[in-house]
Amino acid sequence: MAKIGVYVCHCGENIAGAVNIEEVVKYSQTLPDVVVVKNYVFMCSDPGQDLIKQDIKDGLVDRVVVAACTPRTHEPIFRDAVEAAGLNRYFLEMANIRDQDSWAHWHDKSGATEKAKRLIKSAVAKVRLAEPLYDRYGDVEKSVMVVGGGVAGMFAALDLANMGLKVYLVERQPSIGGNMIKLDKTFPTMDCSACILTPKMVEVAQHPNIELITYAEVDEVKGYVGNFDIRVRKKARYIDWDKCTGCGVCTQICPARVPNEYNFGMDQRRAAYIEFPQAVPKKAVIDAPNCLYFKSLKKTGKPACEICKKGIPPKGIQGCPADAIKFDDKDEYVTLKVGAVILATGYKVMDKTHFKEYSPHSPDVVTAMEFERILSATGPTEGELKRPSDGTKPKTIAFISCVGSRDERYHSYCSKVCCMYMFKHARILKEKYPDIKLYLFFIDVRTAGKDFEEFYVYTKQLGVKVIRGGRVSAVDVKPNGKLRVRGFDVDLCSPVELEADMVVLATAIEPPEGTEELGRLFAATCGREGFLREVHTKLYPVETAAKGVFIAGCVQGPKDIPESIAQSRAAAAAAAALVIPGKIKFEAIISEVDRDKCSSCGVCVPLCPYNAIRLEEYKGKDKAKIEPALCAGCGVCASACPSRAIVFHGYTTEQILAQIEALTEV
Amino acid sequence: MEEVTVNVIDLNQCDEDFIKQLIELGAEELKECIQCGKCASTCPMALAGLEFFIKRIIHAATLGLRDILIEDPSVWACQSCNRCVEICPMDVKPYEIIQAVRRAAVRVEACPASTYEGLRNLYRFGHAVFPKGFEERRKKAGLPEKPPTALSFDELRKKYQEVLKQTILEEIAPFPLD
């Protein structure tokens, strides 16, 4: 028979102010198997814990009920105390007579006292039936995969590699660099984006602990925290990267021209191409759907063009000097074992075509990201400011904020960086061309961030016109080719109009394509807006619902470069803290299937939010099996199982029924 | 067909030279204004319900909307109380902007008629506004007919007029400076 000790905490006045402690103590003494009842002003303090420990050591009690505050914060403390005194740490039950009782019923003292009695009675009923449970430990693979080679992924990879961990950096594009490498300058310091990022890209590529896998995607994920088996598909490059020297000959002689994604289609690249001049690794790939060799092979069965390989001998044009062209290249699959994963797949900006009211058909209406390329020295105009329609230099430019952001039809959130990059664009232009007229249309100006407000005021002083409350209603193309912008100026309290040569739309930051699929592969969940979701905004900002899978950068939500880097280094620290010890503790409070009772209905499999259950053959039949490492102890499967074949350790059916009985007894 | 006039402000009217002129005429901190509106919440003009009050005047000035500022009489309604200067968190000195707009307006003779009346009085009597028609009552109360200000001291007023003649008034006064 169990010897139960009940320890009632006053929590200062928090509990004692509403609950009659003396009455509760007297009542508790009458409960079955209860042998000791004590009370103390702060049970969680050292002397409070000593009361419990002493009674256990003296052999007076072998089950403990602490009637106090919330188990969420205090259960670990009391479990440790019970264990330190020699009991199984799961022979402890807490009755929350503060959050669920004294605080909630502060003005009904006798009611609160009665409720405290019930809650203690229920905890006693449960702890009587407690079984000893044991925490288990598993091995952890000391390596990490980072998915996404933008600024966030790069910094996470570098930090982990510098801690001595093996890092696999997987990037979808041929080169790392992400969105940041496309930017001209960065606010608020006006650093040249490529100048500060290129050295980091090289550092990533040369780091002995980083294995860079570009032009590749995650294909399949198996395993669980500490022991992931991840299959990566390396896309066929049709160029042997071991031989390719990045000389660029193929990219000049290839006759097939296609819109250049790197410059958002504002110029052209060839089917054989190097993503951009500072690409790391600087290797060429052949884009098969656009390559004439593959196109003709598909149509006629014969390749029509092999210029990149053989050149055009009659004209004295040589093909690839490194003999690297490999038309028979195939997708390659590698399976990598890692202990943790960081997802840092970044963002994309919304396309202008959604916004019919802003004349997206006009080439002179561009998105801010396109404008970034127009300003960039490596862009389609080589950094010269030109109107896309006719190549003239614009004299008046309108910038429109919140295009697709703060808009229930598209995205309800604020994209956070637009106000600042609009000022950045204005400042770049005003410093280069002091006479240019710039009108910035805002709903309101949001410049929260270190040195941001100062940046705004400085930019205003350069003569940039700020129109607030002015979400532009229309951009129309006038017969003279100019753009009429119609807005509202809340400071003038009047509708306003402007004839501009160019319009720049600050389109919203969105999750990149495939984010949901990526999340699903790793069992990480997405929020309403489609960004990967952190477990807790404040306390667990880099953790996902999937254990061992962390997030960094804009894939979690819009943020600027400093924030992305800060978050990526936080994710690196969290991943390192998980894998470096080499061991991981698995909770004892998990569900287990009694396979002899399991009817093979499979109801539990899709219900499990952690993908921990699968059907596995047992005595010739498929039966449910719960992977203990993945189980988070939520209990969903146990409550749904029609055969009562799932035991939820720590919350067995017998325990729950005993609690219900205790609570409802008249 | 005549164009229908609608109540839309054309931002292309922006006159950068006008902004430069205002800055030269004393609106030195004009471009620092972030339209926070603290001035407007204390401005007697705004409290009295005038629609074109200090905050909007400053915004129109930063946009270089010359015609609107010159044609609207609001700047002349400013009470010169200087509360805005004391309260402005960006140290824009809003009253100085009003003054700069007034100075610009005077240069193109775009002032309300009453302004010229006041200016003439200022030149002739040393006061833009002063009590008139109280001579009898003052006498009854045992006071001198004229108060002991510039009105009573012809010598000093002459000197004052000499000083005024050294100023821009010499160029712009629409009345003889005799």
Image: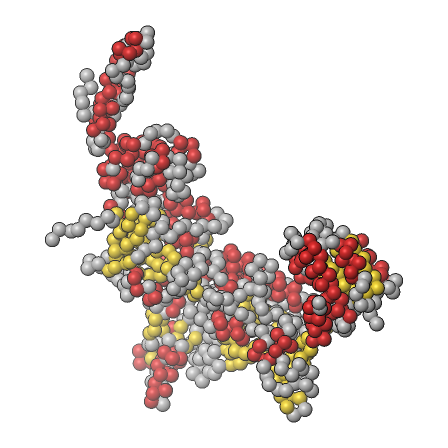
Q: Position of residue A362 (x, y in %)?
A: 27, 63
Q: Position of residue A267 (x, y in %)?
A: 33, 67
Which of the pair A167/A329 is nearer the observer? A167
Colour mapping used in the image: secondary structure
Q: Which residue is rendered at x = 38% and y = 43% of the image?
A: B35
Which of the pair A169/B92 is nearer the observer? B92
- Residue lying farthest to the front in this orientation: A666
Left or right of residue A39: residue B79: left
Left or right of residue A288: residue A533: right
In this view of the protein, can residue A467 be seen by the observer? yes
- Residue lying farthest to the top in this orientation: B142
Q: Which residue is rendered at x = 24% and y = 60% of the image?
A: A477
Q: Position of residue A26 (x, y in %)?
A: 80, 58
Q: Which residue is rendered at x = 76% and y = 66% of the image?
A: A124
In this view of the protein, can residue A587 be seen by the observer? no
> Dividing the picture into quarters, in which one does residue A325 lie?
bottom left
Left or right of residue A198: residue A335: right
